[in-house]
Image: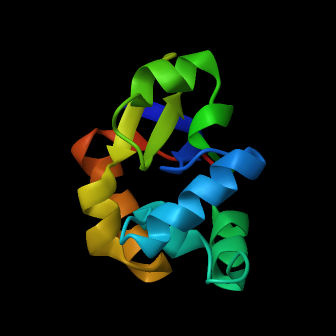
Amino acid sequence: MSVVQSLTGVYDADGGLRGEFAYLAGKLRGHHCSLCDITHSPLRRRREWDTFVASLPVPFDVVQRNERSPRVAQATDGREPCVVAHCDDDRMVVLLDDTTLLAAADIAGLTRALDDAMNAHQLQWPPR
């Protein structure tokens, strides 16, 4: 079994002023990012998100689409929003995609989906 060393969530939105305006315009037209909906309220990042991330045994970073490292971009391109695991055997595994994130809908659902995906991909957390 591979051990997860960290997680990266990739928003289906670009950062920066232009990206923020594009996201808001898209939201008005009905487009949304399922990962954004889990991590943020309409005004700010959710406290439940911060509590969830702090409870994990590995770092969980979230990045805008245009802020991904080249390696994360290669593993996730066209699959945004998503969550990718960085494993000890140098693999990157996309654990959660948009469909799964939409079904998760909140932190409790995300926790269950993450556990299910870890089991399906035969991944484990590092020992504490």
Q: How is the image coloured?
A: rainbow
Q: Is residue 124 above or below residue 46?
A: above
Q: Is residue 59 visible?
A: no
Q: How many marks?
A: 0
Report the side of 97 relative to 32 (left or right): left
Residue at x 47%, y 70% (from the top left corner): 27
Residue at x 44%, y 81% (from the top left corner): 108
Report the side of 21 relative to 31 (left or right): right
Q: Is residue 122 above or below residue 73?
A: below
Residue at x 70%, y 47% (from the top left corner): 18
Residue at x 51%, y 24% (from the top left corner): 73
Percent x, y of residue 110: 41, 69
Tell me the quarter of the picture where residue 31 sits: bottom left
Which image quarter holds the N terminus? top left
Q: Is residue 114 visible?
A: yes
Tell me the quarter of the picture where residue 98 sits: bottom left
Report the side of 28 relative to 71 (left or right): left
Percent x, y of residue 111: 43, 70
Percent x, y of residue 2: 42, 30
Percent x, y of residue 119: 28, 50
| The one of 30 and 87 positioned closer to us in this rendering | 30
| The one of 77 and 90 positioned closer to us in this rendering | 77
